[in-house]
Every structure is written in C-alpha cells, then in structure tokens.
Image: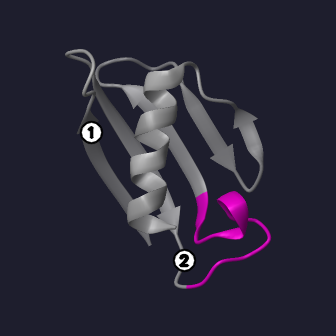
Amino acid sequence: MWHEGRIGSTTSNTIYQYWAKVYETGSEHGINQGKVSKLTIRKVGETRDLYNYDRGLDVGCANDEVRAVLSIILAKYN
C-alpha cells in the first residue's frame, strides 16, 4: 500500500513530503529488512530527492534533518 504525507522539521521551518510503499510484512528488499520497500523524501515544492530507496538505497540522506524525518517515517511504518 502506498502512503503519502508531510513532516515538518523541528529545527527549521522546512516541510518535507514523502511517498512510501509499505507491505504487511518485512522483507529482504525493505529498509533494514522492514516493511518499507520504496521511499522518497523531498522538500515540499521541490523535485530533487533528498532520500530515495527503491528496494535498495539510491540517494542517501542529504543531511541530519532528512535523517530525522527518515527516522520518524520508519518508526511509523517499518
């Protein structure tokens, strides 16, 4: 199932948008063998991926703020 959402940064006024493909069970293709097999994170209104995982890491976290957003998403879905 696909999920889409927005997460605001706790350290700046930046809002990030994400798209995640989440399965009911974890697999070898998921992030940390979890349920999220595809995930894209971008700043709202921008087209550049700040993080992208598609059954393997394509674009690593751009900075610590994106890492924090990634942690929130994984805590919710993975």
The amino acid at mark 2 is Tyr
Say which residue appears at 68% left-offset and 64% top-offset.
Answer: 30
Say which residue appears at 75% left-offset and 42% top-offset.
Answer: 57
In the rendered view, would you say 10 is above or below 76? Answer: above
Q: Which residue is mark 2?
A: 23
The amino acid at mark 1 is Ile
- As drawn, the label of residue 22 is none
Q: Which residues are magenta?
A: 25-37
Say which residue appears at 68% left-offset and 30% top-offset.
Answer: 60
The x, y position of residue 21, in whole percent, is 51, 62
Number of residues whose C-alpha sits closer than 10 Å to that of mark 2, classed few (under 14), some (14–19) or many (20 or more): some
Tag 1, which secondary structure?
Answer: strand
Q: Residue furthest bottom?
A: 24
Q: Which residue is mark 1?
A: 7
In the rendered view, would you say 39 is above or below 14? Answer: below
Q: Is residue 39 left or right of residue 19?
A: right
Residue 31 located within the stretch drawn in magenta: yes
Q: Is residue 37 left or right of residue 72?
A: right
Q: Quadrant of residue 44?
A: top left
Point out the image quarter for the N terminus: bottom left
